[in-house]
Image: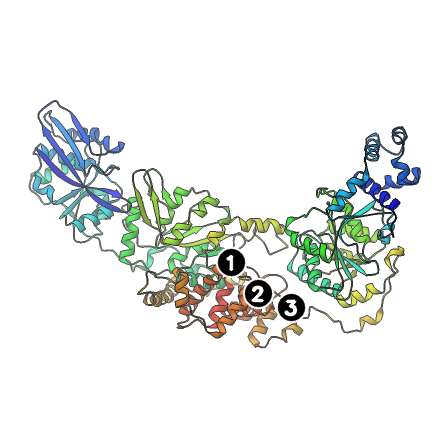
Amino acid sequence: MVSVVFSAAIGGIYAQIINVEADVSDGLPVFNMVGYLSSEVKEAKDRVRTSIRNSGFLLKPKHITVNLSPANIRKTGTGFDLPVAVSILAAYELLPQELLDESLIVGELSLEGSIKRITGILPIVLMAKEKGFKRVIVPRDNALEGAVVSGIDVVGIDSVGELFSIISKGEELPVTETVEVVLSDEKVYPEDFSEVSGQFMARRAVEIAVSGMHNIILSGPPGAGKTMIAKRIPTVMPMLTFDESMELSRIYSIAGLLDEERYILTARPFCAPHHTATVPSLIGGGGKAAPGAVSLSHNGVLFLDELPEFGRDTIEALRQPLEDRKVNISRMNASYTYPAGFMLVASMNPCPCGFYPDRTKCTCTPQSIERYKHRISRPILDRIDIFVNVEKTEFRDICDRNRGEDSKTIRARIEKVRQIELKRYEKEKIRFNSQLSGSMVDKYCVLNEKCLRIMEKAYETLDLSARGYHRILKVARTIADMDGADDIEEEHLREAIGYRGFM
Amino acid sequence: MIEMTDIYNEARWEALSGILVYDAKKADELMEYFGSTEELFSASESEIKALDFLTPGMAEKVFEVTRKDPFSEAERINCMGIDFYSREHPLFPKSLYSIDPVPIGLFVKGNLPDERHRAVAVVGSRTSSNYGRSSCSIFCKEFVKSGMDVISGMAIGIDAIAHESALAAGGPGKTYAVLGCGVDIVYPLTNQVIYDRITENGGVISEFYPGTKPQSYNFPIRNRIIAGLADAVFAVEARVRSGTLITVGCALDQGKEVYALPGRLTDKLSEGCNRLISLGATPALDPRDMTEQIAKLPPRDTGERTTKEYDRSSLNKKATCVFDERETARRIEADEARKVYLALDVEAKCIDEIAADSGMDVGRILDILVSLELDGFAKQVGPCMYVQCIPV
């Protein structure tokens, strides 16, 4: 008899239905598995056979053939163990086929028959809901992760034996209660901006940067608090929406970064890869084309500490995600697209020793300072809109009991600006001022006569490039939005020029 | 008018300078023995090798040079646009006869300084503060405008600023660079633009044979020429134990007037200059006073030593001080902008500091600073860091 069980394979951040067919017939007792399988799926054969036996089933020696279709998709991962086992049991007529028709099953098996957690549950459950399945049977460890999706039964199961006994006794499958996703909880971040004393310039620059999703560089001597500020940038971003959270959780789900404690992302991510990071770890890739840091920081902050220390190739690879807000990863078997809409925050010392322009401490020669700056690839610098200096906090600021504003207050202001941007770009494909293209800059960043004169003067005296010109206009647009102004005024433009940095 | 025989003499000196540049004193001894280069070049091998004041290696080199045709090599150098003036050439700067040792000759791209002009050697460290750079620029422009030449070493830092500002001032004074390598070599390469402009508006000078690499031991040697070509030496910024102080030492040996830019006690880059002042160097307080004082010095080609004269009347005189920030601030109309301008310093200041002093909002300060920058009153030297400037 032939049985069919539905399972799923992950491709990129999306799941796809895989039919697991099992046929049991007379003939020599062999167990064959076909359907373009990777080695971990081929190994399922031994795990399945042993775990079925250890779950208390004695199968008659028959000719067993298992096919995973469609056969042109490469099957990877360990999630096929359970559906293969269930499919074989159904083919032996030990489980009813009707029950299986409305279920999607995933899970890894151990030799004793217990079911172990797998990665990518969230995209699988979302896909199953979309395709109209009644339930998804998942490892119990993964149940919470799947339960954030409402409108579909998520059944967490511990072992093959448990599944069999529930079904054979005609009991109801234990549905995990849908988890209410709470995104307005203020306690999602352990850090808060009120912990940063002083640093008013950096605070202002960060607020502008987040409001328009501008990439920003924090420059300053060692110990000035660059990392401390960077870590608090996600806390002033608007809270994640449900859709954003789902999109992000999908990525974390397939990267295997979700667990019982964190089964959904409620906080905006902050990724800080080390400067020795390789291109695949940053962009994504490897044998399984896994998402990299740029995708794990989607909707959040990618923080590159000590930017000049990063390898040139690593940094250059950021160009595509910075431009497109997504990455394409092509591997032998497939090409995946992961979202990569992050805000780039980088820190750097002003010179190799870190103390320039404080000449009492800095002993760097002008050439070594130039060389240090030139270590950062130009194309990346062209994509950074705001440069700000972070100086060591004054003693009086450290002692000041009246701490700076907290994240909540700043966030409230930023959310207002984001609303303005969303409304303005309703008909465009963009959401933030930083995404304005050349032609859109002409349309949305109109300068009045006075501003034009300022820009003309700045262009000549400050030696701006054409790209620098556009960056300034985009930042000016954000500052004007923060001011609630419809048009860019002189003061907005001049302040924006001040953030142009040393390039 | 130089006669044909002199041209051969020049070529012979030129060839000798290639081997004797580090032992210019040997040239004196050779001339004492042979009387002229012609005699030396026609001397026999045994005669040269028998000279007791030459090491065997040196004698071998001298002998080899005398066997070659000096004229063809001189021709080749000349084709590169490089002139050579031996110590016997009528145009060789007279003031260099009083330095020790007298250079065998000078390779020049461009022109030699006009000896009728007053000249100031401007020296300073390669790493410089904004204070040093802006002061150097103000002084050099004043020198050139009052018809004095600016002599420096075309290194990066203060040297480059000195040449740059001299070139920017336009004239009538000119600027000359004395190099520690061949005049055909631009070192460091970042000074290519300065090099090109100096060769057209002044001259690049070196006692080293064209093609000589910029070896570190060349630089202290050339410093005596920088001092020798000038009436006075102006030290802008120097740490203690620096090349700048070597040049100043040469100047003192030559009996030249020394000026030093005073700085703060806490500033490492000013330590050398402040010590010079404590030793008796004149503090450079006002470029105009300085040009006037230099104009009164005895002519440098006589090698006559200066005797310091203190003009007590200047004590009561109101200085035409160029660093009067309050005077400059009067040119700024808006009150807030003037306040921000006065809060700035000649050293980089970050906006948080200004905000703490003035109580203004950081965004507003940045706005004001950019407007000051566009008018030339301020300059951004790092992300959101500004220095005070005086618009030209």
User: Which residue lies most toward the front here?
Assistant: B4
Residue at the disc numbered 1: A390
Q: State the separation of the CA atoms marked 2 and 1.
A: 26 Å
Name the residue nearer the viewer: A426 or A118. A426
Q: Is A175 left, or right, of A321 in this rendering?
A: left
The kind of secondary structure element at disc 1 is loop
**Colouring style:** rainbow
User: Where is residue A398 shown, x and y percent of the image?
Assistant: 50, 60
| CB contact under 8 Å: marks 1 and 3 | no
Name the residue nearer the viewer: B99 or A228. B99
Q: Is A87 left, or right, of A480 in this rendering?
A: left
Q: Is A91 left, or right, of B172 in this rendering?
A: left
Which amino acid, by three-letter code, is at mark 1? Val
User: Where is residue A307 shown, x and y percent of the image?
Assistant: 48, 49
Residue at the disc numbered 3: B390
**Mark 1 or 3: the one toward you:** 3
Chain letter of the residue carrying label 1: A
Discs 2 and 1 lie in a common subunit: yes
Q: Please report the residue visible at 12 percent of the width from the left and 26 percent of the height from the top.
A: A63
The kind of secondary structure element at disc 3 is loop
| CB contact under 8 Å: marks 3 and 2 | no
Residue B302 in the image: above or below residue A484 = above
User: Where is residue B300 shown, x and y percent of the image?
Assistant: 86, 57
Residue at the disc numbered 2: A461
